Image (tube, coloured by chain):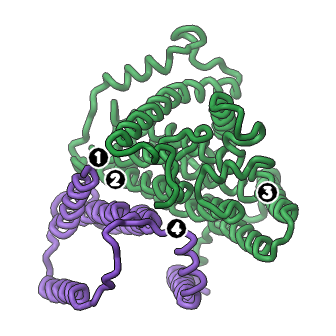
Amino acid sequence: MSPLSFGNHIPGLWAWFDVVIRIAIVTLVMTVIVMYLTYGERKFVARVQQRLGPMRTGPWGLFQAIADTFKLLTKEDLRPAQADRWVFELAPYVTFVPVLMVLVTLPFAKDWGVRNLSLGMFYVFAALGLNIVGILMAGLGSGNKYALLGGLRAAAQMISYEIPLVLSLISVAMIAQTLDLNVITELQHRRPFIVLQPLAFVIFYTAMLSELHRAPFDIPVAESEIVGGFFIEYSGIRWSMFQLTEYGSMFAWSVFGSVVFLGGWEWPWGGDVGWGYQLFLTFLKSFIWIASILWVRATVPRLRIDQLMAFSWKVLLPLVLLQFLMNGFILVYGWPEELLFATSSIGAAGLIGFIVMRGLYRPKSPSLVGAYKQPQGSSA
Amino acid sequence: MATEVLWWIFAIITVAATAGTVFSKSVIHSAIFLIGSLAGVGVMYVFLVVDFLALVQFLIYGGAVTVLILLALMVTRADPTGRPEDTDGPQKPFGVVVGGAIMAILIGVAVSTSWPNDVSDKAHGIPIDTISQKLFIDFGPPFVIASALLLVALIGAIILARHEEGE
């Protein structure tokens, strides 16, 4: 066996109890965080827009999340007559289970996670890739054309952005020479990997926003166009499971991103400050990460679908391949680490500069990054 | 012990999902059952302690290939509400012949191959370094040729799909 887990030394049946207890803790913590993330998001976005947000339920509206939860759990669970019964009813579970699976391998502190898998990073994106299936099932099973459109958009978008996402993570794995999340964290003792791989970080962040359907990539759930997208027909507890998935995967991606790029529990205090500080460090980093996601949501307008696809295939993919190639050259020839930083930060500056320029200046053609052009009459 | 119980549960799920793929009357249901079937095979790989293969199976077949099938079904005229459709056509006898032939070949090959006898009963995982060594160095040329083939197919598909622009 490969040196797998934190709990591997426990023999026999007790290992199962150990796993169950650890999973229960992680799931409960995630659920509470998700409940308060909905409150936090409303407050944060309200502050950005110079409003107060929920204020009436408890002090500063703190009980709003609990009230919302009770409302959702007691609401009637409707199923449209046109819906495909089992596909419709199972879709929320299929969407949710992958997020739960990801929590298994995230290292929250030194030697604390449910299990440490030697292929941890690979496991995370293999598992998170599976929740497209649930979204497609919701889209197909609802018997509603808006749900179908939402599912179609979600699938197209998630498949396209998975490629730059995975390649940017592989760029980091090339430097770390491992896929074990715990070892990746330990390697960031002196500097987090964001310093060595700023371009991969920017690409990962963008692609992650798209995988989460957060603004500006929230076209699968765009209210003004397709009135809510793939979960339009859901209500009550099934709808709340979609919400739980959305915020739960936001939390999972944030922890994962802060472990891979920001040094997780290791940087800047090192590995022996005790698990309390490490836990604090992990959560601090992931909450900063979540806050940045909310900030982007509050300030950036939504993209059009052709712009979205073009941005993935024509901008992110070539850049991430360049990063990949550059890492390969530098690592194979053993060039110094500073060169990794130099090349990658030039790339990152280029990408951010490009996005800012496109935001500031109106492009000459109506297409943002070379959208699909309508055929000019001649050929049918 | 617990592993064996789990193995039987997942084996039954896999076989049931595979049967569902074949016998379901709606194309959409077949595609969803296919996901279950392929994911079940992935779980079998986990029982065989080949973690890497299992994750590849989940990522490629569970997350990508079947999603592409569902995506393709969404843009066709397949009925998304899962009502039974007429799936029998004139292709039925040919389907039986091809399916039976493939099954016969697979079983024949599996039975007639002389498998190496020196394997121990205890499963042990293969470190990922060994896999990458085999894949990229020992079998490097086939890997490169396969990727070039895929690239050609990709570019060909793009050219076919975009020909209406009048180029």
Given the image, what chain letter belongs to the residue carrying mark 2?
A
Q: Which residue is mark 3?
A: A196
Q: Are marks 1 and 4 on the same chain?
A: no
Measuring 74% from the left and 49% from the top, which residue is drawn there? Answer: A188
* Of the two numbered discs 3 and 2 in the rendering, the one whose residue sits closer to the viewer: 3
Q: Earlier in the sequence, mark 2 or mark 1?
A: 1
Task: Report the Cα–Cα distance between label 4 and label 3.
Answer: 27 Å
| SS for callout 3 | helix
Marker disc for residue A137: 2
Location of residue A140 in the rendering, given as x and y in whole percent from the top left corner: 33, 54
Task: Report the Cα–Cα distance between label 2 and label 1.
Answer: 8 Å
Q: Residues within 10 Å of mark 2 (few under 14, many from 20)?
A: many
* Of the two numbered discs 2 and 4 in the rendering, the one whose residue sits closer to the viewer: 4
Q: Earlier in the sequence, mark 3 or mark 2?
A: 2
Q: Earlier in the sequence, mark 1 or mark 3?
A: 1
Q: Which residue is mark 1?
A: A90
Q: Are marks 2 and 4 in contact (CB under 8 Å)?
A: no
| SS for callout 1 | helix
Q: Which chain is green?
A: A
* Rendered view: A334 above or below A180: below
Measuring 20% from the left and 84% from the top, which residue is drawn there? Answer: B107
- Left or right, A380 with reference to A285: left
Depth check: A352 or A356 in front?
Answer: A352
